[in-house]
Amino acid sequence: MNRVLLLGAGGFLGRHIGALLAGHTVLRSPTRVQCDLVRMELPELTALVARERPDVVVSAAGRIVGSGLDFVRAHVVTTAKLIEAVAVAAPGARLIRIGSAAEYGVVPYGLAVGEEHPAAPVSEYGLSHLAATRLAQLAGDAGRLDTIVLRVFNPVGPGMPAGNMLARVTAMVRAAAGGAGDIALGLHDTYRDLVDVRDVAAAVLAATRCAVGAERVVNVGSGRAVATRDVVRLLADVAGFPGEIRPGTFPPDATRSAAVPWMCADLDRARRVLGWAPAYDLTDSLRALWRADGAQATRPVAGVAAG
């Protein structure tokens, strides 16, 4: 069995990745207190990697809200430190980085975007992920260590962070179902590829085992784009909420989502390189989200933007 060091195990993706890896690998997953990648200095991180002696290092740490500086620290600087630490302390290990579809930026409507498509991010968030991806690619191509980046599209499932659109919608639907009546949402005319977080975890497991060649970036999505409005209505239906969803105001973080009207993953490389394909459909994902998180969202929320 591979010995895996999972960083970011306390986050949304990390919790699901850890739950799956625990049954298939020898898993070590330090807490954020034990390993804060942003704050930890390189010698300390190198010592941690040396102690754990991993065959695989998975970096699922990151952030979805913040400033450009926050994103650079959380994605670019941490990836640079990890590359240095793993290259010195565990040079035979594989480094798996969780990237983002935001690295692509705007793509033509109707296109299932492949990994060779030019990456032109339109947000500081996407740019920081792309820079981190390029660092991982360069390290792998130079033979410093074995690297692969999983470019994850829009993950959905239990435990979504509060800044995520579907987490906010879940809270609103729950509040409305409790007697608040209709709900008001700021909805952009966007389409997104939503992938079940359990499928993301399965892709990470596959990446711990597959052969990696020149194709170091791999899309992880559902392969299907869905209108945001339809996703919100489907979540309401899953929750048993029959009320109206009316136009509402947008929060300050809505601009990033509106800048990219369409996103859909081409999964051909994932099938070839990882031997992976998604197993859950969107209804399954939203049911799991509602069962786990719907009962927790009891306070009314004034408004939400959807990407």
Image (spheres, rainbow, N blue to C red):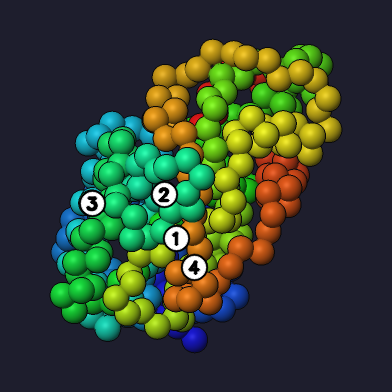
Compute the Cα span from label 2 to label 3. Answer: 13 Å
Can you give x and y, in whole percent of width and height, for residue 147 in the image? 30, 71
Whether residues under marks 4 and 1 lie with C-beta atoms below 8 angstroms apart, the answer is: no
Compute the Cα span from label 1 to label 2. Answer: 8 Å
Whether residues under marks 3 and 1 lie with C-beta atoms below 8 angstroms apart, the answer is: no
The correct choice, above or below, for 21 with respect to 117 in the image is below
**Sequence-earlier tag: 3 or 4:** 3
Amino acid found under the numbered disc labelled 2: Ala
Residue 40: which quarter of the image?
bottom left
What residue does disc 2 label? 101
Mark 4 or mark 1, whichever is nearer to me = 4
Between residue 19 and residue 251, name the one nearer to us: 251
The answer to whether residue 156 is left or right of residue 74 is right
Residue 189 seen in render: yes
Whether residues under marks 1 and 2 lie with C-beta atoms below 8 angstroms apart, the answer is: yes
The answer to whether residue 14 is left or right of residue 184 is left
User: Within 10 Å of the Cα at label 4, are there few (<14), some (14-19), or many (20+) other Cα atoms?
Assistant: some
Compute the Cα span from label 3 to label 1. Answer: 16 Å
Q: Secondary structure at mark 1?
A: strand
What residue does disc 1 label? 219
Between residue 41 and residue 271, name the one nearer to us: 271
Residue at x 23% of width, y 51% of height: 131
**Sequence-earlier tag: 4 or 1:** 1
What residue does disc 3 label? 131
What residue does disc 4 label? 268
Residue at x 50% of width, y 63% of height: 267
